[in-house]
Amino acid sequence: MNTTGRWTTAVVGTALLLGCVSQPAASHSADSERVLVFSKTAGFRHDSIPEGVAAVRELGASGGFTVDATEDAAAFTPRNLRRYDAVVFLSTTGDVLDPAGQRAFEGYIRGGGGYVGIHAAADTEYDWAFYGGLVGAWFQSHPAIQPATVLVEDRAHPSTSGLSRTWNRTDEWYNYRSNPRDRVHVLASLDESSYSGGTMNGDHPIAWCQNYQGGRAFYTGFGHTKESYADPAFRSHLLGGIRYAIGDARADCRPENGYRPLFDGTADSLGNWKQAGPGSFALSDDGTLTSAGGMGMLWYTASGFSSYSLKLDWRMAGPSGDDNSGVFVGFPPSDDPWSAVNNGYEIQIDATDVPEKTTGSVYGFRSADLNKRDRALNPPGEWNTYEIRVEGERLHVFLNGVKINDFTNTDPARSLRDGHVGIQNHGADDQVSFRDIRIKELPAKGD
């Protein structure tokens, strides 16, 4: 939304370490991230480890981070680990760290470090409770290597944003001792009907992320085969996981359960949506809605909501970051987009406007915490996730899992307690895309 026309009336490196990494600790800037690949095995050894190390090196060379590799557990000291933005456990197996190394790694994670676990990283350190929580779930068994269908559940996370909603690939598919869904944010799962030997009763997470005791953690069950590391889709998946772990890309990695789709990427799911005003949204083959023309709004007509958590993924076309859109909440049903402006609230998408009218703001009413917003925001061309939580007359805004706004309605002419939701198409030059609009209704709560 902008300040023109009728809308103003609403005030609305790569080095191979043959032994211990023993260089002195060093600080590093945001453009010199460093990753340690650790591939020690005390059990089964995957013959794909060399291909995995080489792939991470190549990803670092193209992605702008330096890669060191070791199989020496003596690298796990507080001083040495401070050199790294993330540590990759590449198909490690068995007990690979002594108590001192475990303590050093725990301190590293609690101090904000990043962890990436690949495949047999889940077959590691069964007697170390901290590590079990960090990896998310331990390995139990696996059937023969075979093709399977992967269901991509989160298409905003950098590890999965480039994937289709389904991904057919061949690998060794782990069954896990527990289902991590209640503890982690599931990125992808397996369709157990598409292969033989799945034992997780139809709910089979295979890749996930989480915020863990101060650090960032990403795990993928892919990566058993040598061929995996030459597969562009898997390499993109792995690169996105590393970028999240080193803090180069933001994502909402809180557990997400109990949501139902309002728009799931299919034309059928648009049956309960209606365009109000000029312009439109175009639906692409990958399940993305992109704004065109305007100013108007696509709104959900089937029902209003009173107490809820609304989540959706959005992306500016870029590269300038001056595209404009927003998410409206709390407005009555109407084919006039001005009804939303005059009776509801807009959560803005436009990172270049003034504070009370920029990304994360309640447009015209309350600025986001701009320091938190700037740290949480991904740049144009990359996906972001909003959670807009309405409880009574109170509205919370989360960007990529970070709370950036807290607003309470005191205007008797407006109410958040019962209203519809919609997404804005702003103008011919503003291209903003949306994916996976979902909602979880919450118990009624006072202000």
Image (cartoon, rainbow, N blue to C red):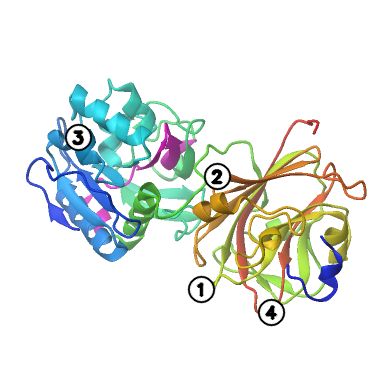
CB atoms at circles 4 and 1 under 8 Å apart? no
Kindly identify the amino acid type of the residue bearing the numbered disc 2: Gly
Q: Are marks 4 and 2 in contact (CB under 8 Å)?
A: no
Report the Cα–Cα distance between label 2 and label 1.
24 Å
Q: How far across and how far down the image is residue 71, in percent?
A: 13, 40
Q: Are marks 3 and 1 in contact (CB under 8 Å)?
A: no
Asked whether 93 or 82 is in front, the reply is 82
Residue at 29% x, 60% y is: 231
Tell me the SS state at disc 3. Answer: loop
Residue type, mark 4 in image: Ala
For the residues labelled 4 and 2, the Cα–Cα distance comes to 30 Å
**According to the image, label 1 marks what residue?**
319
Helix, strand or loop for disc 2? loop
Verify CB contact (< 8 Å) between mark 3 and mark 2.
no
Ranked by sequence position, the earlier of labels 4 and 2 is 2
The spot of residue 139 in percent (x, y) is 32, 30
The amino acid marked with disc number 3 is Phe
Which quadrant of the figure has residue 99? top left
Disc 3 target residue: 76
Q: Specify the segment rendered in magenta.
A: 203-230
Position in image of residue 381 (x %, y %): 50, 67
Question: Which label lies toward us, 4 or 1?
Answer: 1
Q: Nearer the viewer, residue 443 or 445?
A: 445
* Residue found farthest to the bottom: 428
Q: Nearer the viewer, mark 4 or mark 2?
A: 2
Vertical side of 269 occupied by 425: above or below: below
Instruction: Indicate which disc, 2 or 1, sits on the residue closer to the N terminus.
Output: 1
- Residue 47: in sight, yes or no? no
